[in-house]
Image (cartoon, helix red, strand yellow):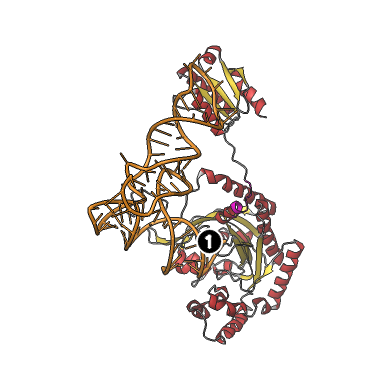
RNA sequence: GUGGGUGUAGCCCAGCGGUCUAAGGCGUCAGGUUGUGGCCCUGAAGAUCGAGGGUUCAAAUCCCUCCACCCACCCCA
C-alpha cells in the first residue's frame, strides 16, 4: 500500500448515487413483502461476542474457521463483526424474553454482513443481507410460509428463472443414524476422496455432500439420500412441507446434496439460485434451526429463517434487464441573474420548499444559458428565471422545460401556480 | 487460502521499447454577441500511463515486488 491515494478496503464498495435506485427498489420490496406477511423489523448491532457466532455456526464451518472479522476491544472482549444474521436475532430473542410474546415471533432484518473471503463479482467482504426469522413454532406450515415469502419477494422484484432447491437433513434424533450410513458409505469407497473430504469424514460428515471437487462428484452424487433416513416425525414434516409448497404452486427440486454451510440447521434446508448460473450464484437460502435457541441459552424454541444477499439480487436485476424507477429529484430550478435576483431566489426557494415543491437553486455567477443547461440535466419540469426585470416588477418568468412555453407570474403567486401545474 | 487474467484522465478505451511534450469518445466547464436548455459547432480543464523498484542510451510499452479488480477453485449471500 505505497499508494498515497486511499481506496475502499479490499472487498468493500461504495454504493454511489447512480446505484441507489436499485437499493431503494429492493428496500421497497422488502417493506412490502414483510408487511404482507407480518414480519417486524429488528436491527441488531454490527458486532457481537465472538462466542455467539462460534457456538451457533459450528467450529468446523468455513465461517468460523477462516471468515470472521474478530478483534479485541479495549476492555479485552473478543468481538466479531456479524458474519450472518441469525445468531444475533436469536440472541435478541432470548435477551428480550420474546418467548413471552405470542408465538411464533416473526422478525426481519436488513444488515451489513462481514466475511473475510476472496472478493469476486457478487461477493464482498462487507455485503448486505435481508433476512427473516420465524421463531417458536415447528409446524411445517411455517416453513412453507417462509419459503413462500422468499419466493414472493423475488417475484415482487421481477426476478424470474430462479430455482428453489430443497432438502431435509433430519433432527438430533435421526441425523446420527443417517450420518452413520453416510460414513459407512464413504468408508466403502475406494480411496479416491480429496483431502478436504478426508477431514470432513472425521469432523463434519454432512459436509461431504457439499464437496465440489470433480473427483468426489460421482461418490457424492450416489450417496444415500438423507430424506430417506428421516425419523417418522421428520419425514412427516418434510412430506407436509412439500404438500404445502405444492398448494402454493412453488416449484422446487429435491437436492439430497444440499446441506448448507452452518451446523445449526435441522430438518428443512433450501437455497435459491438463478437457473442458468454456476459458481457463487446463490442469491438466498435458509432452513430450520430447531435447537439453536436452546443451545444459546434460551428456552427451547423451534425456528426457521431465510436470508438473501442484496448485492447479488441487484446483480440479477441488472442481468435480467428489469427496469427500475428513477428516484425523484427536484421539480423546479430557480435561476437568477445578479445579486438582487439572488436574494429573491433564496426567498422563493424557501417558499416553494415550504409548499412541498422540490426546488433546486443555481449557485455561482453563471450565464443564464449555463443555468438552463443545468436545469436540463437535472430534469426539472419548470425553471423559474429571475433577472433585473423580474425584480423590478416583483414577478418571475416561469419556463416549462418540456417545450418553449413560458409565462410571467407574480412572485407572490408562484407557489400556488406551481402546485397547480405540478399536480 | 490456491491458480489464471487485467490495471492508461470521473467513465469507456487507442497506443505495447524511441516519432507519447499519451490519441479518441462520453461526461464536466466555458463560448457560439445584448437574459433562455435539450441537437449542433468551437474551445478549455482533466493522466505522476495502479504503486514501488529494476533492465536499457531510451519504458505506458520488458522484468520483479506490492495493491486493487475480474475469472476459476474453496465457500457462500
The C terminus of chain A sits in image quarter: top right
- Which residue corresponds to the image point at 55% horizontal and 77% vertical from the top-left? A208
Above or below, A132 against A366 in this view is below
Q: Residues within 10 Å of mark 1 (few under 14, many from 20)?
A: many
- Residue A193 inside the magenta-drawn segment: no
| Chain identifier of the residue bearing label 1 in the image | A
Disc tally is 1
Kindly state the secondary structure of the residue where label 1 is placed: loop
Which image quadrant for residue B65? bottom left
Where is residue A52? Give x, y as percent: 50, 65
Looking at this view, is B30 or A8 the one in front? Answer: B30
Where is residue B37? Give x, y as percent: 54, 27
Which image quadrant for residue A229? bottom right
User: Which portion, as a residue range, is magenta?
Assistant: A316-323
Where is residue A2? Give x, y as percent: 32, 53
Which residue occupies the extreme right position in the image? A247
- Which residue corresponds to the image point at 57% horizontal and 87% vertical from the top-left? A188
The N terminus of chain A sits in image quarter: bottom left
In screen coordinates, is A337 left or right of A285? Answer: left
- Which residue corresponds to the image point at 75% horizontal and 61% vertical from the top-left? A249
- Which residue corresponds to the image point at 64% horizontal and 59% vertical from the top-left? A105
Looking at this view, is A25 or A237 the one in front? Answer: A25
Where is residue B56? Give x, y as percent: 24, 56
Looking at this view, is A142 or A251 the one in front? Answer: A251
**Circle 1 sits on which residue?**
A84
- Residue A317 inside the magenta-drawn segment: yes
Above or below, B43 against A29 in this view is above
Amino acid at each position: 500500500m505505497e499508494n498515497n491515494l486511499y481506496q475502499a478496503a479490499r472487498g468493500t464498495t461504495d454504493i454511489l448515487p447512480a446505484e441507489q435506485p436499485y437499493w431503494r427498489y429492493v428496500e421497497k420490496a422488502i417493506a412490502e413483502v414483510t408487511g404482507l406477511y407480518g414480519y417486524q423489523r429488528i436491527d441488531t448491532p454490527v458486532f457481537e461476542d465472538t462466542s455467539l457466532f462460534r457456538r451457533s455456526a459450528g467450529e468446523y464451518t468455513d465461517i468460523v474457521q477462516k471468515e470472521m472479522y474478530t478483534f479485541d476491544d479495549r476492555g479485552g472482549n473478543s468481538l466479531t463483526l456479524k458474519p450472518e444474521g441469525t445468531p444475533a436475532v436469536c440472541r435478541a430473542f432470548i435477551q428480550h424474553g420474546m418467548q413471552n410474546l405470542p408465538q411464533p415471533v416473526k422478525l426481519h432484518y436488513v444488515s451489513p454482513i462481514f466475511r473475510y473471503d476472496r472478493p469476486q463479482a457478487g461477493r464482498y467482504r462487507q455485503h448486505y443481507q435481508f433476512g427473516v426469522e420465524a421463531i417458536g413454532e415447528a409446524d411445517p406450515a411455517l416453513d412453507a410460509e417462509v419459503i413462500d415469502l422468499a419466493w414472493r419477494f423475488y417475484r415482487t422484484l421481477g426476478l424470474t428463472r430462479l430455482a428453489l432447491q430443497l432438502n431435509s437433513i433430519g433432527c438430533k434424533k435421526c441425523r446420527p443414524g443417517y450420518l452413520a450410513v453416510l460414513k459407512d458409505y464413504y468408508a466403502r469407497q475406494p480411496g479416491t476422496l480429496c483431502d478436504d473430504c478426508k477431514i470432513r469424514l472425521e469432523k463434519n460428515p454432512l459436509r461431504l455432500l457439499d464437496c465440489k471437487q470433480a473427483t468426489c462428484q460421482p461418490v457424492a452424487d450416489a450417496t444415500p439420500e438423507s430424506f430417506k433416513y428421516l425419523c417418522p416425525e421428520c419425514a412427516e414434516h418434510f412430506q407436509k412441507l412439500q404438500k404445502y409448497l405444492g398448494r402454493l404452486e412453488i416449484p422446487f427440486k429435491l437436492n439430497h446434496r444440499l446441506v448448507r454451510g452452518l451446523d445449526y440447521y435441522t430438518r428443512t434446508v433450501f437455497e435459491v439460485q438463478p437457473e442458468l448460473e454456476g459458481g457463487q450464484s446463490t442469491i438466498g437460502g435458509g432452513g430450520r434451526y430447531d435447537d439453536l435457541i436452546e443451545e444459546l441459552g434460551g428456552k427451547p424454541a423451534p425456528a426457521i429463517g431465510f436470508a438473501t444477499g442484496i448485492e447479488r439480487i441487484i446483480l440479477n436485476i441488472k442481468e435480467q434487464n428489469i427496469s427500475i424507477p428513477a428516484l425523484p429529484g427536484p421539480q423546479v430550478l430557480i435561476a437568477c441573474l445578479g445579486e438582487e435576483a439572488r436574494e429573491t431566489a433564496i426567498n422563493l426557494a424557501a417558499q416553494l420548499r415550504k409548499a412541498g415543491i422540490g426546488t433546486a437553486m443555481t449557485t455561482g455567477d453563471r450565464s443564464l444559458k449555463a443555468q438552463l443547461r443545468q436545469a436540463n440535466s437535472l430534469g426539472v419540469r419548470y425553471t423559474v428565471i429571475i433577472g433585473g426585470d423580474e425584480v423590478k416588477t416583483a414577478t418571475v418568468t416561469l419556463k416549462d422545460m418540456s417545450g418553449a412555453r413560458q409565462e410571467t407570474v407574480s412572485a407572490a403567486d408562484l407557489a400556488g401556480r406551481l402546485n397547480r401545474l405540478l399536480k
